[in-house]
Image: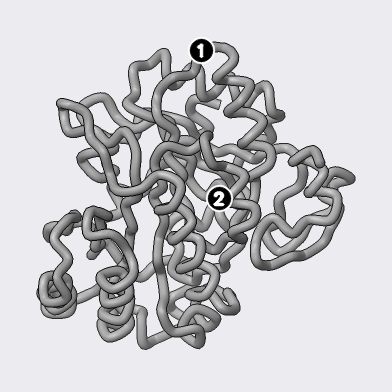
Amino acid sequence: MDFLELLKSCEVCPMRCKVNRINGELGFCRAGFDCIVSKAFPHPWEEPCISGTKGSGTVFFSGCNLKCIFCQNYEISQEMVGKPRDLKALAEIFLRLQERGVHNINLVTPTIYTPQIAEAINLAKERGLKVPIVWNSNAYENVEILSKMEGLIDVYLPDLKYYDDEIAYKYSKARNYFEYASKAILEMVRQVGEPEFDEKGIIKRGVIIRHLVLPGYVNDTKKILKWISENLPAGVYVSLMSQYMPYYRTEEYPEINRPLTKKEYDEAVEYFFEVGLENGFIQGEGANSEEFVPDFDFEGI
């Protein structure tokens, strides 16, 4: 079956809304058939092995299958700021970024547009796209859909947000988040394995797992780190992020309406090493600054 045909009764993500997106029906993520894109530019603030010296060719998609109440990108994830782009236009965006000399094409929040992105990547490759493709997702994915991306994606950069399902539903409206995300990450590792780097330290292939430490929930972070240490190859990288800041709707949730403390983050870093993890990235003070939130000004689209 044509990959795009899946959009006629959409079960692309675990929400399984079964709406006909080809006819313009909208489900939980509010995405129709055309991809909504808000910005495409050489991003300098990703992990060093992704942004390098020339930037990561980052394409920000609008819409999301999570409803994170602290989302820094809520303008696009929840409010759908962006412009519709068809498959040919999306392929052209990838090629223009490559022409600008970026190290890779970095697809941010791609899950809800998986069939369209697969088609656009193939179109772009026919026209000379050669740089690695990075799948930068929240990991709330269906494995049977993700498996169709094998051979198209070089680097997987998933978030592993929550271990506890009650926390996941409270803050992101995601049911069974860890069950889906952990299976998705195992599939990602199966496809591309441990990270491989070029002579300049830029990633060519492999998995890097991101985890944002939430204030008051260091114990949930520890459960995630323990799972990674016990279930994934030692060479998989973990990016342990301290950049949480009260944003969007956090005023409605007083318990997380504050920055992460240095003590909390240090405790998470200490546990990272305690469970035997060795490869990854940590963030210094000042990472939770609005200056690192992109301006979604339609650049590059």
Q: Is residue 260 above or below residue 156?
A: below
Res. 288 in view:
no
Question: Is 222 left, or right, of 254 in this rendering?
Answer: left
Q: Earlier in the sequence, mark 2 or mark 1?
A: 2
Q: Is residue 163 above or below residue 36?
A: below
Residue 192, given in percent of the width and then of the height, sits at: 40, 44
Q: Residue at x 49, y 78 (%)?
A: 168
Q: Is residue 103 above or below residue 126?
A: below
Residue 138, given in percent of the width and then of the height, sits at: 48, 59
Q: Would you name the residue on which mark 2 appears?
A: 76
Q: Would you name the residue on which mark 1 appears?
A: 128
Identified by mark 1, the residue type is Gly
Identified by mark 2, the residue type is Ile
**Residue 34 appears in which quarter of the rendering?**
top right
Q: Residue at x 30, y 69 (%)?
A: 228
Question: Is 174 left, or right, of 17 in this rendering?
Answer: left
Question: Is 290 left, or right, of 277 in this rendering?
Answer: right
Q: Secondary structure at mark 2?
A: helix
Front-most of 51 and 186? 186
Q: Residue at x 24, y 62 (%)?
A: 240
Q: Secondary structure at mark 1?
A: loop
Residue 177, given in percent of the width and then of the height, sits at: 52, 74
Residue 117, given in percent of the width and then of the height, sits at: 62, 36
Quadrant occupied by the N terminus: top right
> Which residue extends farthest right?
23
**Residue 278 appears in which quarter of the rendering?**
bottom left
Q: Residue at x 48, y 82 (%)?
A: 252
